[in-house]
Image (cartoon, grey):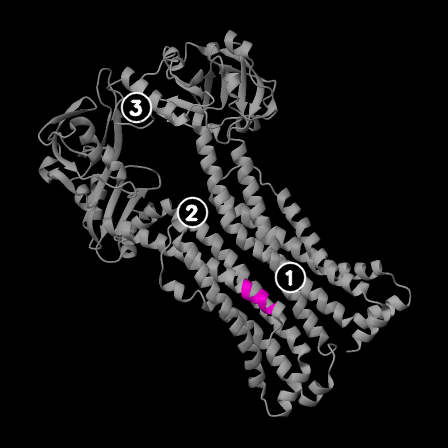
């Protein structure tokens, strides 16, 4: 039988590789099933056509496409128009479409009728479900009129609500569909038969157009699940490789230990295939046991996946999961088994020591140890670089903002007009129970890519930004409206001589840059690269928002509700304000990162454990081969430190090169993953160096421990043991 230590390592590696494969295939199966369900709603034969030049389609081009034999139906989509007028109660967005549009997109109506050819040129409209709800509530909408962009349209139909997960069509809930009066800028086409054939036919009629299928449109929203699935698949592949090399190493070394047994079996009639089956069968048994455990563990994790925010489903691919690591281990064991079986019986009986085939055994052992070190170091380097780069990115979102800091602003997207927040609302907010501090903020885009954000008194107590150079604005500068500014890091890096201490003009006034802040996420919230005192440009602000700090002991959620109720009373016919907690969003982002790191860390940790175990086994075998030599060295005056140094040196030859390659591969993989997650900023590659140093230290320690045991033997005992 295989040695218990090697068998246990093989079972553990196969079990975790099987678990990773099971979870990866489960996530991918659920992803593909959800994608198919969504595409089925509109049809897989639907695709989207636009011109790369963003030009409009002419009426002749639209007719040419509709007349193609490969096209079943075509509809045009025009430009969305949102027009607001003073005194108008609602802000509506219209979308011009051709009469075929609702039928082509398979839009269901909850009331009224769809467009017909007779409606072209008429002012009729179909309302999205949300528009109807806001405008008419429970009342009947068909037959009534709505004002869109200064024109009155008669409602002829109302769309049924479209679920939020239907990313292709959900925007229609908030739109008013009206007949197309101008040229369309995009076409929806339903193919008759083959989609590629229809696209080819359209490409011949309209050269230079681009195509996007319905599947591709929906796939965008499953980006995260696909990345996680690929990460787990890569880890499973690495562990399967470790399992294969471990199996080959165990069989190779075990065949040397069992040389006498092989000779006896051959002498009594055992054939080469019989010996191969003996060793391969033992590997298959151990691998099957590990695969069974992995299937059970993977099924449990998949069952609990909703707790981690993932959806997992069983599919046909799961039938292959146990076979992959089992087949990998079995195939890897064939060659060393065949090599051991080909030794003639007489020679096998005469080779009672481990000196037999030592070159081959050591070679396989070094490959096994190096592979384990490479995969383990690569996995941990990937995890460390990915995790700490994301953490550094998240840490630069805001300065000391926590969940007690709230941002109150007018909604960016709403059918109802936005409330017109003014500095006069400061006093009302300060009167709310639980509010400790209120600071006015005012964004303003000035054109040509330049914009500023004004901050009022109290800003310094919020500590909104994480400064990377210079200093923050002072309370005196803010209250006096001084001409000083903070700029974002991306803005500063774009300046040839740097921004700190330089001056730039805003509306004819000179502002001096006193500090640079990390704008990685602030750019998303503020949308402008510079921060100035509110009073320095008091006359330019059109829109206002407020930063609110909640008192200790009060619930931020309750204060959010109080703020929402306040502005609903102040602006009863306007859209509710948005109350955002940057600290809460930051916590959620960190929670997801740590959840992902925990999920992947277990697999990476096992790879690293296998690396240490592989190095320990290799050095134990190597020193056992050289035990007699070590005894002679000790007898001639070598001390124990020399013996330990010898073992550490042998381990270092394998560990340093393998760990370096693993660190490089892991860092490269982390860079690709960060790019897929759209994380900007410098790569924290220093953590790969730290991981490489840790891997080398562990590998050297694993190699030094057997050397220490050998060094503790007396010279006479080492020589005596080495003769066996």
Q: Main secondary structure of the magenta part?
A: helix
Percent across and percent down for residue 262 are: 64, 84
The image quarter containing residue 659 is bottom right
Horizontal side of residue 424 vs 414, given as left or right: right
The image quarter containing residue 389 is top right
The image quarter containing residue 134 is top left
Q: Is residue 403 visible?
A: yes
> Residues under labels 2 and 3: Cα distance?
32 Å
> Residues under labels 2 and 1: Cα distance?
31 Å
Q: Which mark is residue 576?
A: 3
Percent across and percent down for residue 446 are: 43, 19
Most extreme residue toward the top is: 480
Percent across and percent down for residue 43 are: 24, 51
Tag 3 secondary structure:
loop
Q: Which mark is residue 308?
A: 2
Tell which tag, 2 or 3, sits nearer the viewer: 2
For the point 41% across and 55% down, the residue is 302
460 to 178, vertically: above or below = above
Horizontal side of residue 90 vs 421, given as left or right: left
Q: Which mark is residue 613?
A: 1
Mark 3 crowd level (few <14, some 14–19, many ≥20, 10 Å Cα): many
Which stretch did the figure color magenta? Answer: 6-12
183 to 667, vertically: above or below = above
325 to 63, vertically: above or below = below
Q: Which comes before the other along the chain, label 1 or label 3?
A: 3
Quarter of the rendering occupied by the N terminus: bottom right
In magenta stretch: residue 8: yes
Mark 2 crowd level (few <14, some 14–19, many ≥20, 10 Å Cα): few
Most extreme residue toward the bottom is: 268
């Amino acid at each position: 039988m295989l040695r218990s230590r090697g068998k246990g390592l093989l079972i553990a590696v196969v079990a975790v590789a099987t678990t990773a494969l099971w979870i990866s295939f489960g996530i991918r199966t659920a992803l593909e099933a959800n994608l198919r369900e969504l595409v089925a709603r509109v049809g897989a034969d639907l695709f989207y056509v636009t011109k790369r030049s963003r030009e409009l389609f002419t009426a002749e081009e639209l007719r040419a496409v509709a007349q193609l034999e490969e096209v079943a139906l075509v509809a045009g989509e025009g430009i969305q128009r949102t027009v607001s007028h003073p005194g108008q109660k609602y802000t509506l967005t219209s979308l011009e479409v051709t009469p075929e549009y609702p039928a082509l997109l398979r839009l269901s109506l909850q009331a009224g009728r769809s467009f017909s050819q007779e409606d072209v040129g008429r002012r009729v409209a179909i309302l999205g479900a949300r528009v109807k709800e806001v405008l008419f509530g429970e009342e009947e909408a068909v037959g009534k009129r709505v004002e869109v962009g200064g024109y009155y349209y008669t409602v002829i139909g109302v769309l049924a609500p479209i679920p939020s997960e239907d990313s292709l069509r959900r925007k229609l809930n908030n739109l008013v569909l009206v007949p197309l009066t101008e040229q369309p800028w995009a076409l929806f086409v339903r193919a008759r038969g083959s989609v590629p054939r229809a696209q080819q036919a359209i490409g011949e009629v309209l050269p230079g157009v681009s195509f996007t299928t319905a599947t591709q449109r929906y796939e965008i929203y499953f980006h995260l699940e696909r990345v996680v699935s690929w990460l787990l698949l890569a880890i499973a592949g690495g562990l399967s490789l470790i399992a294969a090399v471990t199996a080959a190493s165990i069989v190779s070394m075990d065949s040397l230990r069992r040389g006498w047994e092989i000779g006896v079996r051959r002498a009594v009639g055992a054939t080469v295939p019989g010996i191969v089956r003996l060793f391969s069968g033992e590997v298959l048994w151990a691998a099957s046991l590990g695969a069974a455990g992995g299937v059970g563990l993977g099924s449990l994790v998949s069952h609990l996946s909703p707790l981690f925010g993932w959806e997992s489903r069983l599919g046909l691919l799961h039938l292959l999961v146990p076979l992959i690591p089992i087949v990998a281990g079995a195939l890897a064991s064939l060659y060393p088994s065949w090599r051991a079986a080909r030794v003639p019986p007489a020679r096998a009986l005469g080779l009672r020591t481990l000196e037999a085939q030592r070159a081959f055994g050591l070679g396989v052992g070094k490959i096994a140890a190096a592979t384990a070190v490479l995969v383990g170091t690569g996995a941990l380097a990937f995890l460390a670089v990915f995790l700490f780069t994301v953490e550094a990115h998240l840490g630069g979102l805001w300065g000391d903002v926590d969940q007690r800091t709230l941002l109150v602003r007018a909604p960016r997207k709403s059918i109802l007009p936005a409330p017109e927040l003014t500095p006069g609302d400061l006093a009302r907010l300060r009167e709310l129970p639980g509010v400790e501090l209120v600071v006015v903020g005012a964004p303003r885009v000035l054109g040509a890519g330049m914009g500023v954000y004004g901050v009022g008194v109290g800003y310094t107590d919020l500590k909104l930004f994480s400064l990377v150079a210079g200093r923050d604005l002072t309370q005196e500068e803010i209250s006096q409206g001084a001409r000083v500014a903070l700029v974002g890091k991306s803005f500063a890096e774009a300046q040839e001589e740097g921004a700190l201490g330089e001056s730039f003009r805003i509306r004819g006034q000179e502002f001096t840059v006193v500090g640079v802040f990390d704008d990685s996420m602030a750019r998303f919230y503020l949308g402008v690269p510079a921060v100035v005192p509110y009073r320095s440009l008091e006359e330019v602000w059109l829109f206002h928002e407020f930063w609110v700090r909640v008192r200790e002991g009060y619930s931020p959620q309750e204060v959010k509700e109080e703020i929402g109720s306040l502005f609903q009373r102040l602006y009863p016919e306007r859209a509710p304000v948005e109350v955002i907690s940057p600290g809460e969003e930051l916590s959620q982002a960190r929670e997801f990162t740590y959840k992902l790191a925990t999920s992947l860390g277990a697999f990476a940790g096992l790879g690293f454990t296998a690396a240490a175990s592989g190095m320990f086994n290799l050095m134990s075998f190597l020193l056992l081969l050289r035990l007699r030599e070590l005894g002679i060295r000790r007898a001639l005056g070598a001390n124990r430190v020399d013996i330990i140094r010898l073992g550490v040196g042998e381990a270092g030859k394998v560990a340093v090169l393998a760990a370096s390659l693993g660190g490089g591969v892991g860092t490269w993989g982390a860079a690709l993953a960060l790019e897929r997650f759209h994380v900007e900023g410098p790569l924290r590659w220093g953590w790969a160096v730290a991981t490489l140093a840790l891997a080398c230290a562990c590998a050297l320690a694993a190699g030094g421990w057997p050397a220490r045991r050998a060094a503790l033997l007396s010279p006479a005992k080492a020589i005596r043991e080495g003769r066996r």
